[in-house]
Amino acid sequence: MKDPTKFPLLHLPLLAIKEVLNTLSPLDLVNFSLASLKSKKIAKYFFKQHLNLQYRLWLGIEEELRVGIIGTENIYYFKLTSDKTKDGHREERKLFKYSEDPLSDFKRYVEYAIDTFCWPVSSLYFNLGAFIAQNKSIIDWFKLHVEPFSYFSLHSDIISDEYVSYFLNNIEVDSNLVLNTKMSDNFQLILPRSIEKIEIDKSNFVTLDQLSNFDCEYIRLCNTKISNQELNQFFKNWMTLKSNINLQTFSIHIENMESLDTILNLPHERVDPGTVRTFRRWIHPFLVTGGFDIKRDDGKIATFFLEPYMEINISRTSLKFKNIAIGCSKQYPISQYFVNLDFEELSFVIKGTQTYFFYDFTSNENQEGLLENDDDEVKYVKYSEDPITELMNYARYVMKVFSWPVRSVFVAFEKFEERNKEITDWLKMHVKKSDFITFDQLTNFNFENITLRNTRLTNQELNQFIKNWMTSESNVNLRRFEIYIQNRHSWDIITDLPSAEEINVSMVPELKKMNASKGFPLLRLPNVALHEVLSTMNPLELIFLSKTSLRAKKAAKFFSKQKPISQYLVDLNFENPSFQIKGTLIKLQYNFRLNEDRDELLENEDDHYYYSEDPITDLMNYAGYVMEVFSWPVRSVFVAFDKFEERNKSITDWLKIYVKSTKVCHLTGEIISDEYASYFLRNIQITWCLHLCSEMSYNYRLNLPQYIQYIDIHESDFITFDQLTSFDVKYITLRNTRITNQELNQFLKNWMTSKCNINLHNFHIHIQNRHSWDIIIADLPNAEKLNQAMVQALGYTRKMEGFDIKRNDGTAATIYLEVQNDEDWNLSMLV
């Protein structure tokens, strides 16, 4: 009798198995695949064919080794531990595994996830001091098994010149490098050209010559020894196109305000302190008030501005600098900033642009001086034996000097229970209501929405405030203003305005929405309630909401980061213009069609249509907006070169600017597409798979970008034997090829002697018939024929026969003859 406690999952119909696998987390999916060879095949097959999940791996090499699996709104962690009692223990989304050799088991787990599920490694956090003796072998392992990283971060408290150089010389880096390692003063950092963003926290070794050679879009340096005079020369070189011509954002610490006198000893223009402009740090927009503009010889303009930490640090150095900082805070004005106080995490937070600035206080001496910087946050850590007192002293000083208002306070009563009353008394004394807001401060607030209660502003000042707004003298970006007043008499004084026209309340759209029984003030809900409402929306509904108003856009954007709905991926189709959004359980498509097609198409709940005179332009505008607001990555791009031939290059140029890279790319077209395909592949980075279905000339030479790992060519009559042997990819599929049987025989022999295609995992090619097979496998050395049962187990289509072959380094491969419909003959090779 069968054990009633066991469930025969693998005996269920395929559809039922799929539904079960849909419920599994990635950790459980890996565990399921490890149960048996059959479960591995099923998990691998269903993941690729049905689940539509785009997971990627995050590797953490520290004293505790971790593998993060990212792809949904949650991150799952596999952690290796030397604590036997934790073996198999689960903590929410973390799984612990005991190991006597953690590093070897870490490598095996990563290799298994890559080989079985094709999950790419996108990020690496590597502490070079954790396994010093094995650093080079770890890097060699990366080179052999891991695709190029899009982001990696190297850390250490040891001199790491040798290891950093070895890493950069051997590992392909896609775009981002964070270097927080201790380096010798004479270290020469040579960056690969593929790095677009570089952040160096301990940049004492960086000289002017090295800085001038960094061909990056984003550079941030901390703890630098570059002098003010050298910075002045650096900017002069930029202005005359002598260096760093691709630079878009540059951030560096300077000592004091007097440094600016030396640095700005060059042609520049001071921007009106009341001028507010939107800039981008990497891909994120933020506001800058005032500043200094310099112009390059080609007409490009750059702006100098100071971050708020700069102001605080300057002000604490001396009375002179304190006066400069106060003057600066009123002149620029940086009075747009406000403060959040956190008495749980002991953090002083400054907000006013798109970036949050955190000044954290800790009793952990090892974190002293730690500086973290990314697109949305800048964080500095200060050690103190009494961090609460230090936070209160720091906050009191800043509020006294800069008068930045406190927007929110967070107190966790259980965290520092014995000091709750002391914290409350301090807040009562130093964090007051809005009765500290003066008329001058109000007119300097560069906000879209202002709400004041318990204010000391007079009726006459409010009247003048409105007049100033009417004449564009202040608060030009204001959209909504709400303030408490005493009575109707106050209203009469305040509204004594020129050309004021009394209106019917029912005609004010916002008030009408609030009062109408059928309206619902969604954006006025508390954040928690608003979060719950937005969580019920699908991605298209969220996009539509974001376009209704600036406030709705901000709410949707904030929600997309908090939720996060970053599990969504985008597919762009330029044949039948459409924007498709995919998630774990959802697939929605927004189609762009010509107006004359309106009567031929019907919408359903998953497909929506937009009719236009220019569908391609509208698709690009829509996609650009969504990617800017929600930052959903583009998973695949489909381009038909024959559909909009005159716009092929403009589509490629748009993709280069807004998409930059895509995991999968489909190129098709029934025209000779040599020029268009070459231009596309030169400008668009494909990180995984290229499907080439377009017609190419007989002599076309396909130069594959370095990051592609999978190629599928439908019309491969242009592929020669030499081109095939030069493809350094893992997966190759060729159809309609001109490669001869003798050349295929030589191709297999070259692989067996490690002369070509050593990274190949899977090879599939169409052949003519059984006679071709006999020629191809003739005289292969040490080929071992498989029995028929083993051949049939290799897949779902009919297999005729197969052989095992072995490379001279011991790597084994299986080649087999596959027949579909008794007429389509193919040779397949599995490594």
Image: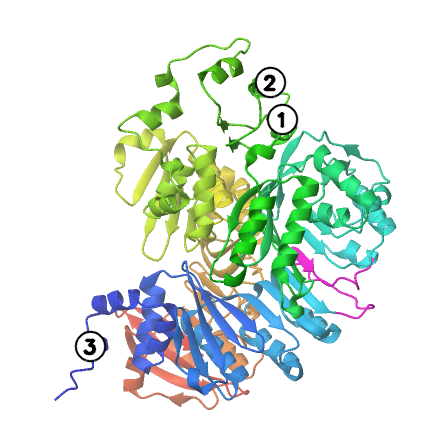
Q: Position of residue 398 (x, y in %)?
A: 67, 46
Instruction: Locate residue 785: give its quadrant.
Output: bottom left
The disc, 2 or 1, on the residue closer to the chain's N-terminal end is: 1
Residue 617 location (% of width, % of height): 47, 35
Asked whether residue 379 is in view, the answer is: no
Which residues are the magenta region?
A: 183-207
* Residue extending furthest toward the left: 1
Amino acid carrying label 3: it is His
Left or right side of 165 for 645: left
| 2 or 3: tag closer to the N-terminus | 3
Position of the C terminus, as image quadrant, is bottom left
Picture quadrant where residue 323 is located: top right
Q: How many numbered callouts?
A: 3
The residue indicated by pointer 3 is: 11
Residue 205 magenta-drawn? Answer: yes
Quick one: SS at disc 3?
helix
Q: Position of residue 829 (x, y in %)?
A: 42, 76
**Mark 3 and 1 residues: CB-CB less than 8 Å, in contact?**
no
Between 818 and 283, the one nearer to me in the picture: 283
Compute the Cα span from label 3 to label 1.
76 Å
**Cβ atoms at labels 2 and 1 below 8 Å apart:** yes
Answer with left or right where residue 795 lies relative to residue 646. left
Is the residue marked by circle 3 packed among few (<14), some (14-19), or many (20+) residues within 10 Å?
Answer: few
Element marked by disc 2: helix
* Residue at 65% over, 62% down: 178
Which mark is drawn over residue 464? 2
Is label 1 in a helix, a strand or a loop?
helix
